Image: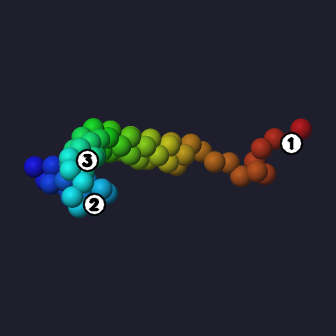
């Protein structure tokens, strides 16, 4: 319900007053788009965060040798 109210408010701000159903349609479209895209963006953000943490953990585990410890050729 909150999404529909927010969509109607957004539609009225975009189109203006006394423009008929155009604002309602834009608001409904914006609410439908947000309903579909926000969970997907949240999942992508969570996956990116988890991947970053995994890479950081692997970087901490791998041994780092000083440059003078490498054999010279």
Residue found 81% across the figure and 41% down from its top: 71
Residue found 24% across the figure and 54% down from its top: 19
**Residue 4 left/right relative to 58:** left
| Pointer 1 or 3: first along the chain | 3
**Residue 55 left/right relative to 30:** right
Q: Which residue is mark 1?
A: 72
- Outermost residue toward the left in this view: 1
Mark 2, secondary structure of its residue? loop
Mark 1, secondary structure of its residue? loop
Tell me residue 27's x, y (percent): 24, 49
Residue found 20% across the figure and 50% down from its top: 20
39 vs 13: above or below: above
47 vs 7: above or below: above
Q: Residues within 10 Å of mark 2 (few under 14, many from 20)?
A: few
Residue found 38% across the figure and 40% down from its top: 44
Quadrant hosting residue 28: top left
Q: How many marks?
A: 3
Q: In the image shown, does 16 or 35 lie closer to the viewer? A: 16
Q: Which residue is mark 3?
A: 22
Nearest-to-viewer mark from 1 and 3: 3
Q: Residues within 10 Å of mark 3 (few under 14, many from 20)?
A: some
Q: CA distance from mark 1 to mark 3?
A: 74 Å
Q: In the image shown, does 52 or 56 lie closer to the viewer? A: 52
Q: Which residue is mark 2?
A: 16
Nearest-to-viewer mark from 2 and 1: 2
Q: Is residue 1 visible?
A: yes
Q: Are marks 2 and 1 in contact (CB under 8 Å)?
A: no
Tell me residue 45's x, y (percent): 38, 46
Q: Is residue 35 visible?
A: no
């Amino acid at each position: 319900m909150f999404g529909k109210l927010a969509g109607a408010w957004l539609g009225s701000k975009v189109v203006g007053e006394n423009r008929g159903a155009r604002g309602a349609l834009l608001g409904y479209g914006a609410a439908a788009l947000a309903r579909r895209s926000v969970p997907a963006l949240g999942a992508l953000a969570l996956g990116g965060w988890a991947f970053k943490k995994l890479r950081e953990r692997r970087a901490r585990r791998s041994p780092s040798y000083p440059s003078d410890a490498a054999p010279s050729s």
